[in-house]
Amino acid sequence: MSASNKKKLRKELNTAAMTEKQRKELKEAKKLKAYTITFAVVMVLVVAILVGVLVKAPIAGMLDRNSHAVTIGEHELSAAELNYYYVDAIRGYCNEIQQTYGNYAMYFLGFDTAKPLGEQEYNKDKGTTWADHFIEEAIKNAKSDYSLYDKAVAEGHKLSDEEQTSFDTSIKNLDLAAQYNNFSSAKSYIRSVYGNGSSLKSYEEYCRIGALASSYFRSYADSLKYEDQAYRDHEKGQYNKYSSYSYVYYLVSVNDYRGEPTKDENGQETYTDEQMKKARELAEVQKNALMGVEISNKETFDKAIKTLKINEKNAKAESTEEKNALYGTITFNSDAQKWIGNSERKPGDKEFFTVMSGSGDDRVVTGYYVVVYTGSENNNMPMANVRHLLVQFEGGTKDQNGNVTYTDAEKQKAKDQAQKLLDEWKAGNATEDSFVELVKKHSADNGSKEQGGLIEDINPASQLVEGFRDWALEKHQKGDVGIVESIYGYHIMFYVGDDDLTYRNAMIKAELVEKDITEWHEKLVEGVTATTVDLSRMDYKYILH
């Protein structure tokens, strides 16, 4: 397992799918997903959007293959073999910067893509270059991989049938990757990425070692079990963290009451002290007006907002509603977060929070958040497992934005087909196995079709279409069925049963495993030595362009 790639591979140890805001809160708790076994292969299939295809300066392949660059434990790696880790460290870094900064990624790389990495300073105090840095990362990653690989071999761990099939398919798809990137063969494509010392055989071995390492890592993570007391001990002092809250809020902004600006001699818009003083007074009046009326939900909140003078001509003025938001995602105001998370809160409770800017004697009011609490959930409900068969809408009319709408007749046709299939199933054995066969034969959802339409660990934050998720979270018995409409069509639903974990415990388990497996992995890596022998054959002239 490559250490520098852990960020990409530790995403969903617990199976709760989060919204973007909730994933931010659970970022640390969900770092540890076991590697997808095709990771090393996928790395080469991806064309770096950031800089185009990565290009290496030519090197003498035979010398690279016959060299001895580093010893990892009992494994002697040539420059060609270490180069796989080296290039992937560079590509992984570039892809991470690309994902973080998008179109501005080039400005945050830290080096010039048109110059050799070995000629660009990385750490002035240590006198190291960017090439030195990535070689160091490569050795760390190799050490991580081999520590897991050797442990897996020693314990007789093997890839599962599914993992082996996925791995074999990925290797076979290298020819397609080559064609996609305009290379005549997989061999020439691999060499263009990893240098003349690379070969299909050694690249496959590199991927195989990484695949077994990641499979063993995942297997160990999955083996970790905890008693209920461990969950309860972990949440002490941070109970709110695993609870969800519903609330509605609105910002009464001082800036909305400043009036018309004047322009200074440079053409910049300015507001007088008198204007700002009056604006703060008006904002406070409007805040008090909202605090003086009864508000219980978004509907009544929006009605009150539209009565504000500033919104007389603003039909779009409305509050912001959050439902089942994890405590850590309540970030619009820290005081509001504490208030919302108070165990004494009751639905309909209302409060305002002053927003300030500046410092010391210059601090001024810039607005007021008016917040209405609508409820909370301790997330102790079990997660749900379902199967579904999708009967997709057909036809439809696409508008200029690419959105498709369907007529009532088109929708009814899909609904009738779903009912027909459900009736056929009921007329037969009406078992889970027969439902799986029905799904494999008729479902339009290719993502779950081969798994019999199985969707597991559904919770209130799961990123599923609302009707689908809501049905799954209703009280059901194993074997319950139903038909649900979504934007995709009609889903025939089959309730498989409750998950062993509650949503709350799933979140906590993710953090427990994060801690335990990190300590286990670090100890494993510490037991493996890495000795540099000769790095002269490494490509210090590596250039991205």
Image (cartoon, rainbow, N blue to C red):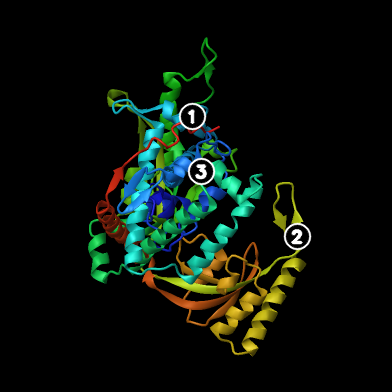
Given residues 487 and 147, the one toward you in this image is: 147
The residue carrying mark 2 is 396
Q: Nearer the viewer, mark 1 or mark 3?
A: 3
Q: Position of residue 540 (x, y in %)?
A: 43, 32
Q: Nearer the viewer, mark 2 or mark 3?
A: 3
Q: Position of residue 20 (x, y in %)?
A: 47, 51
Q: CA distance from mark 2 to mark 1?
A: 44 Å
Quadrant where the N terminus sits is: bottom left
Residue shown at 74%/46% (left/top)?
400
SS label for mark 1 = helix
Q: Position of residue 11 (x, y in %)?
A: 42, 55
Q: Is the C-beta separation of discs 2 and 3 under 8 Å?
A: no
The residue carrying mark 3 is 194
The residue carrying mark 1 is 107
Residue 238 marker: none
Q: Is residue 343 visible?
A: no
The local crowd at label 1, few if under 14, some if 14 to 19, many if 20 or more residues have their Cα within 10 Å, is few
Q: Is the C-beta separation of discs 2 and 1 under 8 Å?
A: no
Amino acid type shown at disc 2: Gly
Q: Earlier in the sequence, mark 1 or mark 3?
A: 1
**68 w.r.t. 382: above or below:** above
**5 w.r.t. 442: above or below:** above
Q: Is residue 215 left or right of residue 193?
A: left
Quadrant where the C terminus sits is: top right
Amino acid type shown at disc 3: Tyr
Q: Is the C-beta separation of discs 1 and 3 under 8 Å?
A: no
Q: CA distance from mark 1 to mark 3?
A: 25 Å
Q: Position of residue 443 (x, y in %)?
A: 65, 72
Q: Nearer the viewer, mark 2 or mark 1?
A: 1
Residue shown at 32%/62% (left/top)?
151
